[in-house]
Image (cartoon, rainbow, N blue to C red):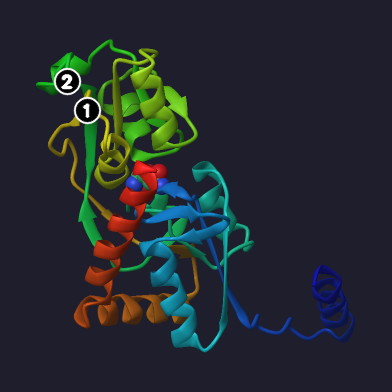
Amino acid sequence: MKKIAMFALAASVLCGCAPKESDTVKMITEATFPPYEFLRGKEIAGIDVEICRAVAQKLGKKFQCETVDFDSVIPAVISGKADLAAAGITVTEDRKKNVDFSDPYVKTGIVVVYKKSNPFKDRDQLKGKKIGVQSGTTSETFVTDELKQEPDRSKSPAEAVAALKAGRVEFVIADIDPAKNCVKGEEELAISDFITSEEYAVAIKKGRPELLKAINETIAEIKADGRLEKWVKEFTEEADKLKEK
Ligand code: GLN
């Protein structure tokens, strides 16, 4: 495959023509974020995967999905390694400087995960405390920018929650759905109400209006015909079952 791609590139350089548009839509994600993306054995499954698969279908192209650390998701579309970045990515003004966002497909936010023996009551309580977050996320910027302190960074919400259980951090901040998944079946843990209000969207390299249009049309369709709602329900149930195992 790689050889063929290199040959195509060399051929296009030699003949001076533009490389042919790929027949595959490549999605980049970070598969530790249930129910939006998680590993079902070796396969990446979840709401975001279905959204991107539907975009590929609309474009009449094949579909591929790869998982990397969350910090590397947006850089992968900027560099052209992938077409669609979907990983429960919150639309932020900062990120908008580097990528284009589709219309949002969910309204959500971050919450505090705490031990019932150390209940979370209000924001002031977080000041000066050891707080676990997933690296590169809006939870991290909440701690650095709003609380003006350094968080304890993990690779996934589950890893951050493991640090909470082990007593290495006092609170964890994470997006509500993976947080709910993490506390499933954990009697000692609970989650707070939203402490922010956020929206998820698909991120793409700037300057791809056709692709953006196809994503927005797909999002409108899956919202209107009930597919999105069905995926949310199905993947939440599946991810919860996997957690319980
Ligand atoms: N929504 C959060 C963000 O965009 C977390 C996303 C994630 O960890 N996959 O930063």
Q: Check the picture and name the quadrant holding the N terminus.
A: bottom right
- Contact flag, marks 1 and 2 (Cβ < 8 Å): yes
| Residue 187 disc label | 1
Q: Residue furthest top?
A: 128
Task: Find residue 123 and report its horizontal and vertical position in percent.
Answer: 15, 22
Task: Find residue 69 and report its horizontal and vertical position in percent.
Answer: 54, 43
Which of these two is toward me, 227 or 211? 227
Which of these two is toward me, 20 or 114? 114
Query: Above or below — where is 41 with respect to 114?
Result: below
* Residue found at x 44% / y 86%: 58
Q: Residue furthest front?
A: 245
Examine the image and state in which quarter residue 66 appears: bottom right
Q: Position of 165 compared to 26: left or right? A: left
* Residue found at x 26% / y 27%: 146
Q: Which residue is mark 2?
A: 116
The residue carrying pointer 2 sits among few (fewer than 14), some (14 to 19) or many (20 or more) residues within 10 Å by Cα, namely: few
Looking at the rendered structure, the kind of residue marked 2 is: Lys
Looking at the rendered structure, the kind of residue marked 1 is: Glu
Examine the image and state in which quarter residue 161 appears: top left
